[in-house]
Structure formats: structure tokens, C-alpha cells
Amino acid sequence: MRCEEVSELLPGIMDGVDQANAEVVSHVETCLRCQAELAQYRKLLRVLHQLRAQSLDPPPGLLVEVLAQLSDAAERGAMRSALAGRKLAYLAGLAVAAGAAGAAGAAVILATRGRGGKLPLAS
Ligand SMILES: [Zn+2]
């Protein structure tokens, strides 16, 4: 199995959409390049979980930090292929979506408070 094939499968596996098969697992276990890529995903997922957990008040600059780390990784040449370009866009999209979800949650809470605690749809 080649790194290109593994890196194509990683996003789905990390998302829980795809299952890692034995071939992928044994490749990653022996391949430093793919391990480094996996570590990047883990780091990003951890940040996304933190964003979700505190969706009301994500620390300012956190998203910017994530995106900066992504560009750092790109600059270091860790993800040089065209595939990597697509993956960065994918990851950036995930991060933006998580941020938007947090903002939407805050908006709902604010709207709820404005109506004396009733949900807008319930009145
Ligand atoms: Zn590899």
C-alpha cells in the first residue's frame, strides 16, 4: 500500500465514515510520513472537539491558530501533493463549519433569552 492511497483514506477514517482496514493500519504502523499526517488530524480533531464543547464562547483566535498551523504544515512541505491541497481545503472547511456551528448555537441562545426563555419556535 502506498502513502498516497493511505492519505486519501485518512480523512474518512478520522471522520468515522470509513473503517481502517488491516492494510491501512499496518502501513501507518510502519510509515513515519503517514504517522505524522495522522498526528495532524488528531490535533485538529481535538481542537474541533474543544470548539464544540464550548460552542458558546470559542476563544478568539483559536480558529485562526488552527488555520495558521495548517499553512505551517503546508509550508514545511509535509503535504506537497495535489491531494494534500484538497485535504487542506477539506480540513479548513471542517474548521469553518465547527466555528459556524458555534456561532449559530450562540445566536439561538441569545434569541431564546430575548423572548423570556421560550424557544422561538415554541411560542
Ligand atoms: Zn505512508
Image (cartoon, rainbow, N blue to C red):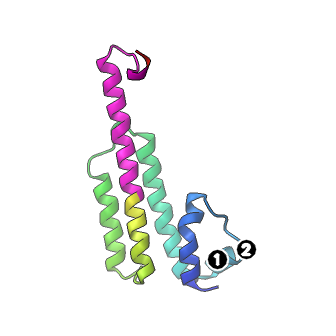
86, 67: nearer the viewer: 86
Mark 1 surroundings within 10 Å by alpha-carbon count, few (fewer than 14), some (14 through 19), many (20 or more)? few
Q: Is residue 6 magenta?
A: no
Disc assigned to residue 29: 1
Residue at image point 38% right, 22% down: 120
Mark 1 belongs to which amino acid? Glu
Within the image, what quadrant is residue 53 found in?
A: top left
Within the image, what quadrant is residue 6 found in?
A: bottom right
Kindly identify which residue carries mark 2.
22
Tell me how far mark 1 sits from mark 2, CA to CA: 10 Å
90, 77: nearer the viewer: 90
Kindly state the secondary structure of the residue where label 1 is placed. Answer: helix
The N terminus - image quarter: bottom right
Q: Is residue 15 above or below residue 102?
A: below
- The chief SS type of the magenta part is helix
Q: Are marks 1 and 2 in contact (CB under 8 Å)?
A: no
Task: Left or right? Give the position of 89 relative to 10.
Answer: left
Mark 2 surroundings within 10 Å by alpha-carbon count, few (fewer than 14), some (14 through 19), many (20 or more)? few
Disc assigned to residue 112: none
The magenta stretch spans which residues?
Answer: 94-121
User: Outermost residue toward the bottom?
Assistant: 2
Residue at image point 40% right, 39% down: 54
The C terminus - image quarter: top left
Mark 2 belongs to which amino acid? Ala
Residue at image point 60% right, 64% down: 13
Q: Position of residue 62 (x, y in %)?
A: 31, 52
Q: Is residue 119 magenta?
A: yes
Q: Position of residue 99 (x, y in %)?
A: 35, 48
Task: Left or right? Give the position of 71 relative to 22.
Answer: left
1 or 2: tag closer to the N-terminus:
2
